[in-house]
Structures are given as structure tokens and as C-alpha cells.
Amino acid sequence: MRQTTKRSLKLTYDLFSRVKTGDFEYIYRGAFTQNLTRKILSLAESNLQRFVDKSSLQNRIYFIMVEGLQNVTRHQEPTNDSKSEHAGIFAIQKVENRYIITTGNTIVNTKVDSLKQRLEKVNNLDREELKKLHREILSTGELSDKGGAGLGLIEMARRSGNRLTFDFEYIDLYWSYFYLQTEIPSRTYARDAAEELEESNAMRDIKHLNHILDKKDILLNFNGSFNQNNILSLLSIIKGQMRVNKSAKKVYYIMVEMLQNISKHGNFHEENTDGNPGIFYLGQTEDEYVLTSGNYIPNEYVADVKERLDIINDMDSNELNEYFNKILLDQNVIDPKKTGLGFVDMRLKSSRKIAYDFKEIDDKYSFFTLQTSVQIN
């Protein structure tokens, strides 16, 4: 196995383990359009419905997600290149009793000071003052030079009940990267100094993560519990993002196999009926799409799965097709679940060997990582 592949497989568990059981993390990077925004919201909403009991809290989180995504879509600056560092970002994280929503997009340096002043003005106002400013802007239309952004910032601060955390990261003489982060606690209480520090750490954490995803050319990262609802939303996002061609179709079908593998076979707790913990991310280089998934697997299955993968990786295309057809024809005799039919299909679609890794977690479970790629054509 190539050293770069080993590092990539190790990254999967590192990204997965940063999210605690019961929490989730969903990050999308790339160009933002109105259509993709709707699909991203659909995925985020499906997780909120499962994690958030109070409809009032759901509404607050959803509003801030919508406003944040609209800001990125409306204010992302067009560039003449396709550098990954110019990709927009949307992230929603559940961290214990807090929900953290972060957006990021490029901004020309000449606009940084004015935006910073608007943000500081919003942060220096209390709830009543924000309400008053909101009314003033509705009547005068001032504060923002790009329709709606001023009102949006005020409403995000009002609905979250917290200051807006922000940062500008210098890219070059013309561009900076603007991060905007909003934290919504699941209950109302007075924040102490430790929680103010956590706010600072949360911004630093997402910036660090964005740099990692940028370096690895990762467009989409979903880290949390997988069930049929969010699988369909993930597939919808990928389908909406990619141009229709042979590569896109292959990526789509391989993604189906990987996500279903997590949903059906990645159970970490037998009593869990609302999805299985796992991670999936999609990367894109100049030459290929790289698909990676990770989930728990009982240790008793590791040797068998490894043996199946090794056998399938050793087959050439003719042997794979013959084996695949035999399984389909002899389903009454051969149980497809025990033959690695999904792995065979992944190899046929990608025309590449499947990279894999097993990391033992405890005496019951290991973490199983799969990775393959599809050439862009």
C-alpha cells in the first residue's frame, strides 16, 4: 500500500474520532448555488429532527442555517480560478449541549474593514438594542451594501442569544477568507469565562479542520449517525453537484455501496435503531474522485472481510465480471452478503483496487476504513 494511501486511511479515523457519540458534524465545501443550498438544508434538517426535541430550538437553528447559507451564496466572490482555498464552506456541529454553525467564503480585502465594523457593531448591542436597530434598518435600508446582509447578521445574533464569532484569514494581496460562526445552546443560561474560551476554541478548530480538508481536496464530509434519510440527502447533494457523465455515475453507485455498508453493517450498539455511527467523505483532485468511508465492525468479522477484500483485489476485470455474474445467478446457493458482492461492484465501477484498514478499538470492535477512486473523464 502506498504511503500516501496509508496516511489517508489514518486520516479517516482521526476525523471520525473528533466527534463524540451522540454528536454529529456535517461539512460541505465547494461552490454554493441555490439548488445545492436547498439540498444541504434538507440533510441538516433531517439530523436536527432526530437530535433536537424542542420545535422552538429547531426553528432557531434552522433560521441561522438558512441565513448563513444565503450569506455565502449571495456574498461569495467570483474568482477566475478553481483553487480549493477559494471554496465556500458550511458546517453544522453538535457538541454536547451546543449547536455550532459555521460558514466561510472568500471576500476581497477592500471589503474586510467595513464588514468587520458591521459585525462589531452587532456584537456590541444587547437584545433590546438589536431589536431597535432591526426596526431602523427596515425603515432606512442602511448598514449593508449588499441586500439583506445587515438584517441577517442582526437576526442571527438575536436568535442565537450569543455574539457572532468571526475571523478574516489573509489569502493573498486581493483575497481574504471570511469565517462566521454562531453558537446556539440547547438551553438558556449565563455563560462563564470557560465557555467564552470554548467559543474561541470552536473557531480555531473549524479553521484547522478546513485547512486539513483543503489540503486533502475534500469537498464533502459527513461525520455522524447514518440512516436512510440522511443517506438519501447525501446522495442528492452529490448528484446535484456533479455534471452528468460516466465518472459521476460511477461515483454515485460506489457512494451508494459505501453508505449502505455503514447503515446496515456498522452497528456499534445493538440497541441503536436510529442509524449507525460512521464517516464518509468525497475528495476531488485534477485526475480523480476519491471516496472514503469508515465505520465500526465487530472483531469477529474482521478476518473474513479482509480475506474477501484480498481475494477481490487479486482478481482482474474478467475474473471480477465472472464472479459477479455467478453470485447473481446462484443467489439461492450463495448468500450475496457473504461474498462481498458490494465490494465486487465497487471494484468493477472504479477499475481500482480497494484500499482498506482495520484499527482495533477494544476487545469487541474495530474501525473499518474503505477507500477507492474514480478517474475523471
Image (tube, rainbow, N blue to C red):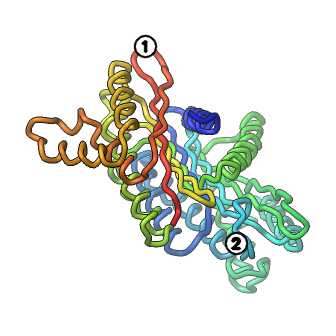
Q: Residues within 10 Å of mark 1 (few under 14, many from 20)?
A: few
Task: Say whether disc 1 or disc 2 marks the residue closer to the N-terminus.
Answer: 2
Residue ranking furthest to the left: 332
Residue 324 shows in the view: yes
Q: Residue at x 59, y 46 (%)?
A: 185
Q: Note whether 143 is above or below 377 in the view shown.
A: below
Task: Say above or below: 318 vs 298.
Answer: below
Residue 140 point in image, percent of width and height: 75, 86
Please, what is the three-letter code of the amino acid marked with disc 1? Asp
Residue 22 position in % (x across, y down): 47, 36
For image coordinates 66% across by 63% down, the residue present is: 88
Image quadrant assignment for residue 146? bottom right
The secondary structure type at the circle numbered 2 is loop
Q: How many marks overall? A: 2
Which is nearer the eye, 128 or 7?
Answer: 7
Q: Which residue is mark 2?
A: 76
Q: Give the answer, above or below, for where 22 lies relative to 61.
A: above
| Residue 93, position as x, y percentages in the image | 57, 47
Q: Nearer the viewer, residue 289 or 162?
A: 289
Residue toward you, 164 or 181: 181
Q: Residues within 10 Å of mark 2 (few under 14, many from 20)?
A: many
Residue for badge 1: 363
Which mark's residue is nearer the viewer, 1 or 2?
1
Disc 1/disc 2 C-alpha distance (Å): 48 Å
Q: Residue at x 48, y 46 (%)?
A: 372
Question: Can you give x and y, in whole percent of width and height, for residue 187 in the image?
Answer: 56, 44
Amino acid type for the residue under numbered disc 2: Gln
User: Would residue 271 appear left or right of 60 to someone viewing this image?
Assistant: left
For residue 93, the mark is none
